[in-house]
Amino acid sequence: MSISISAEIEGGYGHDAQSIIGNVSRTTDTGVAGINIEDAFKHQPGLRNVKEHCQLLANIRATLDNHGYKNFFINARTDTYFQLEQPYEETLTRAKAYVESGASSIFIPGLTDAYEIKGITRYGIYPSNKLSTVKSIRCKHFGFGHALSDKIIAHLTKNAAQLLESRATFCLYE
């Protein structure tokens, strides 16, 4: 049995397109089947310029294709719903542009409105991942990002603290 693994590379861990593309190339060498790459800045508020991010995505896709990774999955994340007050139109613009630039999928965390989700897919943006709590619509793919691991870590932290406080611990002696 084989399982495809996708790597979260945030904004690409580089300050320019060439270093980001180099990092993506090194990521492919590990054997992953795809990446998630964001359009948000890591250490400051704001989103990358759409044209610049599209050029980056196109260059990543071209580099991957030229090195035999034509089926490599690029999941382009847009943080419009975390950074803008009225994100829908900007999300549509970015999603269309990212797909046209070589992204395999669009990841839109924070998108929870069923009408807007249907609107995104109505424009032919497939496959489209949405990290949301919408239960009333049928999805082809569902992901919960880091929500599960965050809950597990919070649970472990709380219970470990309680164990330490109550001294309900044990030691193994040789």
Image: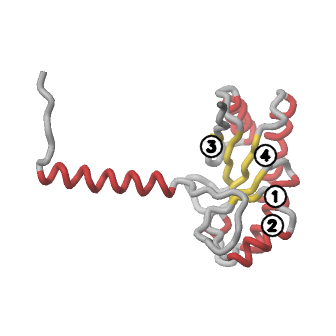
Where does label 3 land, which residue? 9
Pointers 2 and 1 in contact (C-beta within 8 Å): yes
Residue plotted at (73% across, 52% down): 76
Question: Type of residue at label 2?
Answer: Thr
The residue shown at (68%, 66%) is: 80
N-term-proximal mark, 4 vs 2: 4
Q: Is residue 159 visible?
A: yes
- Which-is-in-front pick, marks 2 and 3? 2
Q: How many angstroms separate mark 2 from mark 3 (CA)?
A: 25 Å
Residue 30 disc label: none
Return the mark for residue 126: 1
Q: Is residue 59 above or below residue 123?
A: above
Give residue 8's position: percent from left, percent from top.
61, 44
Q: Measuring from the top left, give residue 111's x and y in whole percent.
A: 65, 69
| Separation (CA) of disc 3 from disc 4 | 14 Å
Q: Which residue is mark 2?
A: 121
Identify whether 62 is placed above or below 79: above
N-terminal of the two: label 4 or label 1? 4
Label 3 Cα neighbours within 10 Å, binned few <14 / some 14-19 / many ≥20 = some
Q: Within 10 angstroms of label 2, few (less than 14), some, or many (20 or more) residues?
A: few
- Reply above or below: 100 against 67: below
Q: Foreground: 6 or 51? A: 6
* Residues under numbered marks 4 and 2 in contact, where contact means CB atoms less than 8 Å apart: no
Marks 1 and 3 sit apart, C-alpha to C-alpha, by: 22 Å
Tag 4 secondary structure: helix
Label 4 to label 2, Cα distance in Å?
24 Å
Residue beneath disc 4: 56
Q: Identify the residue at image location x=82%, y=40%.
A: 61
Secondary structure under the numbered disc 3 in the rendered image: loop
